[in-house]
Amino acid sequence: MTPGIRPLVAGNWKMNGLKASLAQLTAMASQFDAALARNVDLLVCPPATLVQAAAAAAVGSAIAVGGQDCHANASGAHTGDVSAEMLADAGARFVIVGHSERRADHGETDAVVKAKAEAARRAGLVAVVCVGETRAEREAGKTLAVVRGQLEGSIPAGMTAADLVVAYEPVWAIGTGLTPTAADVAEVHAAIRSDLERILGKTESGKLRILYGGSVKPSNAAELMAIENVDGALVGGASLKAEDFMGIAAAYRG
Ligand code: PEP
């Protein structure tokens, strides 16, 4: 939590979801009442096949829809890829870039992630740039250096709090049920805030949302969201069901 920063709870459905799954989005929308919407923004990032239908299903609610990845180019000979412009055209307002699963499965380097974040800005989308250390890096005491390197390499100059969200996701905490201690989360988020100050300046850094991601669930959300400089969550598994996702968002009920 950071005074003056409006939190964001974002769901990443990963490679899960068929048309029938949009019933969960509709349920989320119906549970996102005005009292909760006063305190938090909600975002759902379904697979690319569902972005357009999800955006249509979310019309009339305050839930935003995003993509999970984009190509750096606007169009061209890139079979199987989706551009930021295409996501925007389908109704997306955000796009996740640099998720650790893309960095690992597709060999995405910081330079590639940076180009994708640029593409998001070009298309008018908010880029959710993910960073985080592996277990080996944490055990070697390299967490802050790894995260700093990823931020410096992945965030284009001149990005602002209006077009960028940063998500700290320790790779070893994703989908494992493990989470860092509150003290560890606080240490990394404070370091990210000061790294962002160096990269983007004090004004933007002071306004930027820094999400925590990695095994967030209804039972640990309130504790994690209360940590200084934690301005919301990026949620994988627990974003697939309305009950779980809204249980996490409920951490922001006044
Ligand atoms: C994620 O994929 O971004 C994530 C945080 O997953 P999970 O919540 O399942 O750990």
Image: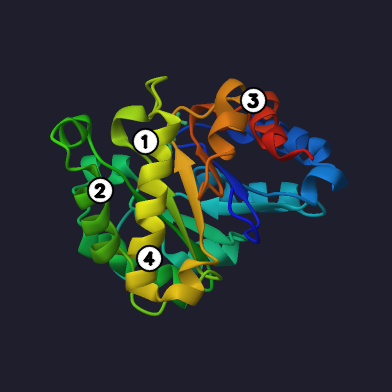
- Mark 4 vs mark 1: give the one in front: 1
Badge number at residue 184:
1
Q: Which residue is mark 2?
A: 144
The residue at 63%/61% (across/down) is: 91
Q: Residue furthest left?
A: 140
Judge by depth and name the residue closer to the eye, 230 or 246.
230
Q: Amino acid at mark 3?
A: Asp
Is disc 4 in contact with disc 3, using a CB cutoff of under 8 Å?
no
Q: Secondary structure at mark 4?
A: helix
Position of residue 43 measured from the top left corner of the image (x, y, whole percent):
62, 48
Distance from the alpha carbon under mark 4 to that under mark 3:
31 Å
Horizontal side, residue 81 vs residue 13: left or right: left
Q: Amino acid at mark 2?
A: Leu
Q: Residue furthest right?
A: 34
Distance from the alpha carbon under mark 1 to that under mark 2:
10 Å
Q: Which residue is mark 4?
A: 196
Circle 4 Cα neighbour tier, 10 Å, few/some/many (<14 / 14–19 / ≥20): many
Horizontal side, residue 181 vs residue 245: left or right: left
